[in-house]
Image (cartoon, helix red, strand yellow):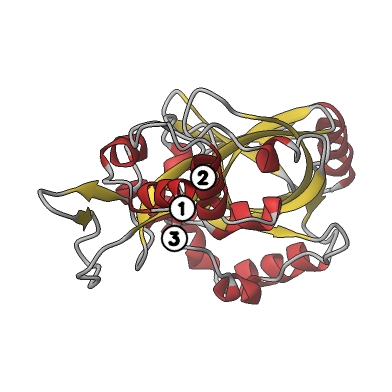
Amino acid sequence: MKLYLWDQATRDFCKKFKSYERTPTVLLVTTVNTKTLGGTLALTSMSSSRVFMDYDVQPTIDYFAWLGANPDIVEQVNAEIVTKRCLFECTATINDVVHGSSWYYIACSGCHSKVSKGPTSLICTNNKCENVNVSGVAQYLSKISVYDNGDQAVFVLLGDVGRELTGKPASELVRSYFEANGNEGVNHEAPVPEALISTIGQKHKFCVKVTKHNFSGKTRSLTVTKILPLDTPPATESSEGNETTAASEETFINHVGSAEGSKRSCDGTDLEEAKRLKHGD
C-alpha cells in the first residue's frame, strides 16, 4: 500500500524522521482517508492526522517491542490485514442530505434484508432468513454529506442509525406521509422527510465502518454504525463486538442492492395500511 502525507503531517514526519539516528521501524499515522489509486490501496493524511514513530507513544513502543520479539513476522505480513474491517470515530457536521436516490427501502421485518414481490406475498431475498410470513417494513437507506476542517465525505445511514439521528423510525415517517397523501399510488415513493432535512447543520460524532468494499474504487461512501454523543470518549477495540446495528454492512450490501426496485414492487403492506387509516376503511 501507499501512504500519502500532506501539509502538517508531512512536516511532522520529516522532523521526526530526521531526529532518529537510525531509520525508524514503526510508523503510526492517525485519522486517514482510504482510497484506491491505480489498483493500489492508498492511505491519505487529513488536517487532523498525527504522526508517531518508534518510541513516541505507548502503541508504537508496544508494537516496536512486539516486532523485536518476532523478527520473522515481517516476512509473513499478509496484505489482507490492511483491508479487513475497521472502525473509527469522527466528528463532522451534516452538510446536506444526498438526493437522487431513495432514502429508505422495504425490508423483511425479521432480518431487515430487502424484500421482493412474489406472486401472492413478499419474499425475503436473504436465503438464510427463517421468516416464513414476510411482512415489509420501511428501513433507512439514507446518504448524508458531511464535512470537518475542509474535508468532506458521504455517510450511509442504515436501519437503527437513521433513527438515532432523526429520533423517528423510517416506517413511521413513511406511514405518516401516506396517511397525509392518501391519493398517492402504492408505487409512489415518499420524499425525503423533514426529520432528515432538519439535521442539516447539526454536528455529531459518528462511528464509521470501513470494509473491503470501500477499497474497491466503486464504493464512495462509508457506513455509519452508530451516532455517539459529542462528549463520548474514543471507543476501544473491545467495544467493537458490542455494537448493535440493524444488520451487518455485508448483509446490506448483498441484500439491499437495488432496494428501489423492491420498494416499487412491494405490495405496500405499510402503505396500504396507511391509506386505509386515511380513508377510515
Closer to the chain start, of discs 2 and 1, is 2
| Res. 161 image quadrant | bottom right
Seen as rendered, the residue at the extreme left is 119
Query: Which residue is painted at 87% across and 38% down in the image?
Result: 12
Local packing at callout 2 (Cα closer than 10 Å; few below 14, some 14-19, many 20+) is: many
Left or right of residue 21, residue 74 in this image: left
> 268 or 243, which lies in front?
268
Relative image position of residue 71 (x, y in whole percent): 54, 67
Closer to the chain start, of discs 1 and 3, is 3
Closer to the chain start, of discs 2 and 3, is 2
To which residue does mark 1 refer?
277
Q: Amino acid at mark 2?
A: Glu
Helix, strand or loop under label 1: helix
To which residue does mark 2 refer?
179
Relative image position of residue 197 (x, y in whole percent): 70, 35
* Labels 1, 3: front one: 1
How many callouts does the rendering have? 3
Helix, strand or loop under label 3: loop
Q: Which mark is residue 248?
A: 3
Q: Amino acid at mark 3?
A: Ser
Q: Amino acid at mark 1?
A: Leu
Is 77 located above or below residue 64 in the figure?
above
Local packing at callout 3 (Cα closer than 10 Å; few below 14, some 14-19, many 20+) is: few
The residues tagged by marks 2 and 3 sit, at their Cα atoms, a distance apart of 32 Å
* Labels 2, 3: front one: 2
